[in-house]
Image (cartoon, helix red, strand yellow):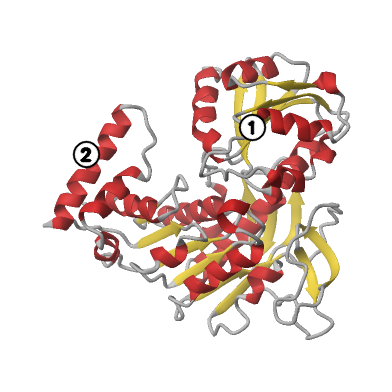
Amino acid sequence: MRKILAIWAAKLAASAARLLGKNGSSMPGSIALKICPDILTRLSQDIEKDIIAVWGTNGKTTTNNMIYTVLTEQGYTVVCNKVGSNMLSGVVSAFISYSTLSGKVKADYACLEMDEAYARIILKYLTPSKIVITNLFRDQMDRYGEIDTTVKYIQMALDKAKNATLILNGDDPLTASLGVNYKNAKYYGITENLGLNLNETREGRYCRACGHELSYEYYQYGQLGKYRCDNCGFARPTPQYDGKNIVCDDYVSFDVCGSHVDLPCKGVYNIYNALAAYAFCDSSGIPGDSIAKGLKKYKGQIGRMEEFKINGKQVVFNLAKNPASFNQSIGNIINEKRTKDVIIGINDNDPDGNDVSWLWDVDFEKLKNETVTSYTTTGIRSKDMAVRLKYCDIEQNKITVGGDMRRDIINAVNGSGERVYIVVNDTLIFSTKKILSELEDKE
């Protein structure tokens, strides 16, 4: 009876939130958990095939949704927290959205993005048969602390799912180290040197086994690359899913396991996300050509290199929440040869992390580029962001401290650049998306 009451209350709350124009992706789950604390255990037992957990500092939402796209293109019904609400209440909300009023979930798979710190809590209520881990970078310091703390949280979660198959990014030494003593581990990566030559802040340069600094033949980005410990022999594993013939332009493509994959999105990091999705789907018995067709139909979620046209000008909108993701966003901006106006939005609400000192770990110096015609900082910490840009020796007359996102977007669109790039952190995502959708040219 508690289970049914919890589902009814949660569905009613979700309907009310939609009527009020709210996102409400985790609120229904919070209500359900108060009424029936073990509701996730009860609902997850209805999944017919696999429960998939997707973890990692960056790329969780994209990888999760790529897997979802391929599975649904194959005709499967999939429970998925598509908008990235990845704590316990968000996962519960996803199951409730697929539940009947009588409390039955009719689904083949559950594909669930999970926050690294909350995964060990979520796994008290369900056990995934496959776990995908994208990468491990330093994240919000006040929530996760140093990177070793994040690794510890992941290991605690893995201890609750010892029989799961791990699908790991072999190019990340921190992620790859999780599979050393794991009997069911598969790896994906990119063996060819992409020659990106990014001079950026790097995490995880020390061997998890013995503490010695790793030797690198080359870096792809961050700490991802071909590495080896000359002291104990720990080294990059040979990936079963090796991306080859990489093309990284307006859109990206690659070959893997005899299949050619075209992605309707930008960025080398999306190749890694797609390789992770491919590895899971292949290990689940889906033919390579079918995986490639599904990945080609993938559409980015909110703030994942979304494109809008406003007053005839292209506007690119992206989420960046930590140094690694910001550095990738900066790379996309400066690799764009056309001139552009740039908006950077920083909030310090709880989901963002209250401590914004991580801004000094981002290589904003690279934004001092002749193709950038103006810089606008916005959000609660707009002034902090403006100070950070000042210390990059960017001309002060090019920096504007904004604060009203609608006005800031309109001003940038009316600027002299050929494009506009907007990069924001977590709690600015939905409000910025709403404004962009309202301003977007109507065909």
For the residues bearing labels 2 and 1, Cβ distance under 8 angstroms: no
> Which residue position holds label 1?
381
Answer above or below: position of 48 versus 272.
below
Whether residue 397 is visible, yes or no, is yes
Answer above or below: position of 286 versus 372.
below
Of badges 2 and 1, the one in the foreground is: 1
Q: What residue lies at 47% left-to-right and 58% top-to-bottom?
A: 114
Helix, strand, or loop for circle 2? helix
Label number found at residue 12: 2
Residue 333, image x, y percentages:
76, 36
**Label 1 CA crowd tier, 10 Å (few <14, some 14–19, many 20+):** some
Answer above or below: position of 12 versus 253.
above
Label number found at residue 328: none
Q: What residue lies at 58% left-to-right and 43% top-to-bottom?
A: 354
Residue 405, image x, y percentages:
59, 22
Q: Residue 51 occupies which quadrant of the picture?
A: bottom left
Q: What residue lies at 70% left-to-right and 81% top-to-bottom?
A: 209
Residue 281, image x, y percentages:
50, 65
Q: Residue 329 occupies which quadrant of the picture?
A: top right
Residue 55, image x, y percentages:
53, 61
Left or right of 239 on screen, residue 24: left
- Kindly report the distance in space between the C-alpha atoms of the residues bearing marks 2 and 1: 36 Å
Helix, strand, or loop for circle 1? loop
Left or right of 406 on screen, residue 108: left
